[in-house]
């Protein structure tokens, strides 16, 4: 009896899997032999190379669905269940979609039992999470040791050294960086700077033409800012600090962002600055005065929009897209309609829209929603006014915030470090006593003390870093006190009398940030990244 029409699916996520028995060739050989033994007809062989099993967005899976919809196959087969998916949710969704077309999803290691297969799926998902955790932990440790994590193209103007652990200045490209800083510092606009670079023939980072966001990113990147060895030493470990000489350095940061994945796509979120890891890189050759001047020009470029002669209170970088982090821009539209009496009337609508989505569409940002300008501004001002008139509540919130951070990050870590140091010191004293009693030799003592001393040194360094964090927290608290005193001088009557431009100036002085999300919510924070409100977006946003 002839078998079923089957498509063979194989996947490898890394080159390492090729070396450990999961190569495409070996998987296809196993599947072909099984199909021949069962008398199955192989319709097509599909391979996804370099794709994670935790992602459902794979070209091979898309091709499988096309074959299923066309009725050309009856089964999709892989060598192991984790070759198909390492996320149980995605597997269940794929099985449901394929069942609609009468196609079965199977693997050679299926147990034929729902519980057994579920255990395999859970283990595959857990194994992926462990691989991700170990990989991230290794990268974090590598960055703490002063090494670049070569996971993408180097920062513009630099190239990787032969071992890909450090940066070297690429003078051919760094000339363009110095030109950017010089132009912006001389108060040339960002747009004109981009056009000048194109006209002068400087190659942009990824081909095409120079873009305004690229110019701004270079100006704000600390990799190009000259730091003294003393400044760098405050940001890095003792091991890295001891390797520094008297030269100037730039600072490249690792662990700045995290990617949150969902079935609808990915979302990149910025991490708190205290989680960033500083890595010293060679000096870019841009004078500090030029850097500071250029950054000052960039900061002052975020001006309020004057579109349609309206006062846009949240424009100029105050309101931002929660999907891509880009500033939302002011926009308006008009509709002309005829009233019942036959006269024509014009309806004018003002709203905020994500600049990235408006420029590049859904492929660049998923924030298609717009925000009704007036309603949003009224609600934001209500939250800010309420918080500004209650400095006591604000002071208590700041105190809780500091206490929570100290309790979860400082106190907990310090207690764990001290406990671990105590254990290691006891083990060290015990080994020395054994050597004194003649129970172990000097060579064995040295071998066993070496890893213990390394752990003790690392823990002592971490406790020192906690002390430096406390000093930085003290400076932050002084800034908080200054701002609190400023708020306490405000009167309700003074706040009520502020017009739109004055409210915007108040927002800028308080560091207000409004982040708009697709779920019709606004997250409102001000100085010290303290959240002061969360409100729903107006229904008028489309």
Image (spheres, grey):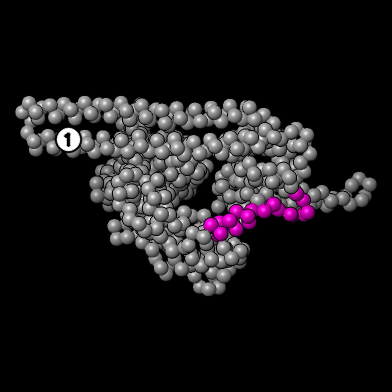
Identify whether 163 is placed above or below 532: below
Quarter of the figure with residue 373: top right
Question: In the picture, which quadrant includes the C terminus?
Answer: top right
Residue 220 in the image: state x and y as whole percent: 52, 54
Left or right: residue 342 versus residue 432 is: right
Left or right: residue 397 versus residue 343 is: left
Which SS type dominates the magenta stretch?
helix
* Closer to the camera in the image, 73 or 126: 126
Residue 531 visible, this orientation: yes
Residue 106 visible, this orientation: no
Q: Is residue 127 magenta?
A: no
Question: In the picture, which quadrant includes the N terminus?
Answer: top left
Q: How many labels does the image show?
A: 1
Residue 260 in the image: state x and y as whole percent: 48, 41
Residue 436 in the image: state x and y as whole percent: 9, 28
* Closer to the camera in the image, 22 or 16: 16
Residue 398 in the image: state x and y as whole percent: 56, 31
- Residue at image x 76%, y 37%? 494
Left or right: residue 61 versus residue 463 is: right
Identify whether 465 is placed above or below 208: above
Q: Does the magenta stretch include residue 304?
A: yes
Range covered by the magenta-colored residues: 292-311
Q: What element carries label 1?
A: helix
* Residue lying at the far bottom of the rendered structure: 200
How crowded pointer 1 is (Cα within 10 Å; few <14, some 14-19, many 20+) is rated as some
Identify whether 13 is placed above or below 424: below
- Residue at image x 43%, y 54%? 227
* Closer to the camera in the image, 183 or 17: 183
Identify the residue under disc 1: 449
């Amino acid at each position: 009896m002839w078998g079923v029409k089957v498509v063979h699916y194989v996947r490898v996520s890394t080159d390492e899997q090729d070396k450990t028995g999961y190569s495409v060739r070996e998987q296809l050989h196993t599947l072909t032999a099984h199909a021949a033994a069962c008398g199955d007809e192989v319709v097509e062989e599909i391979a996804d190379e370099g794709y994670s099993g935790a992602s459902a967005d794979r070209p091979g899976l898309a091709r499988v669905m096309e074959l299923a919809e066309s009725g050309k196959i009856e089964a999709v087969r892989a060598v192991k269940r984790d070759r198909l998916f390492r996320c149980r949710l995605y597997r269940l969704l794929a099985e449901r979609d394929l069942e609609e077309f009468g196609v079965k999803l199977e693997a050679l290691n299926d147990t034929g039992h729902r519980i057994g297969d579920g255990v395999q799926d859970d283990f595959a998902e857990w194994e992926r999470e462990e691989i991700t955790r170990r990989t991230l932990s290794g990268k974090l440790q590598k960055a703490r040791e002063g090494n670049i994590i070569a996971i993408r193209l180097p920062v513009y103007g630099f190239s990787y050294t032969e071992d890909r652990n450090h940066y070297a200045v690429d003078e051919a490209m760094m000339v363009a960086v110095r030109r950017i800083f010089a132009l912006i510092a001389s108060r040339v606009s960002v747009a004109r700077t981009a056009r000048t670079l194109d006209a002068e023939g400087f190659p942009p980072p990824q081909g095409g033409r120079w873009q305004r966001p690229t110019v701004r990113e270079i100006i704000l990147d600390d990799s190009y800012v000259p730091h003294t060895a003393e400044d760098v030493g405050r940001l890095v470990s003792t091991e890295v600090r001891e390797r520094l000489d008297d030269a100037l350095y730039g600072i490249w940061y690792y662990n700045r962002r995290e990617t949150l994945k969902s079935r609808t796509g990915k979302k990149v979120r910025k991490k708190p600055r205290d989680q960033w890891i500083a890595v010293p890189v060679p000096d870019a050759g841009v004078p500090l005065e030029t850097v500071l001047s250029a950054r000052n020009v960039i900061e002052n470029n975020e001006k309020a929009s004057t579109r349609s002669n309206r006062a846009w209170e949240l424009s100029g970088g105050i309101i931002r897209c929660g999907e891509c982090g880009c500033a939302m821009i002011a926009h308006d539209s008009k509709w002309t309609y005829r009233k019942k009496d036959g006269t024509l009337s014009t309806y004018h609508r003002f709203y905020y829209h994500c600049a990235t989505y408006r420029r590049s569409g859904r492929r660049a940002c998923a924030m298609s929603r717009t925000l009704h300008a007036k309603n949003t501004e009224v609600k934001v001002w209500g939250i800010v006014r309420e918080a500004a008139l209650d400095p006591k509540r604000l002071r208590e919130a700041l105190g809780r915030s500091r206490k929570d951070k100290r309790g979860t990050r400082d106190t907990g870590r310090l207690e764990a470090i001290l406990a671990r140091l105590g254990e290691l010191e006891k083990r060290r004293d015990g080994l020395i006593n054994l050597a004194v009693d003649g129970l172990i030799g000097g060579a064995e003592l040295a071998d066993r003390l070496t890893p213990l001393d390394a752990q003790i040194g690392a823990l002592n360094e971490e406790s020192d870093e906690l002390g430096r964090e406390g000093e930085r927290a003290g400076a932050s608290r002084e800034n908080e006190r200054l701002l609190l005193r400023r708020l306490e001088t405000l009167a309700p009557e003074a706040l009520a009398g502020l017009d739109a431009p004055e409210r915007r100036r108040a927002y800028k002085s308080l560091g207000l940030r409004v982040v708009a999300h697709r779920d019709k919510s606004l997250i409102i924070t001000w100085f010290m990244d303290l959240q002061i409100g969360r409100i729903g977006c107006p229904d008028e946003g489309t």
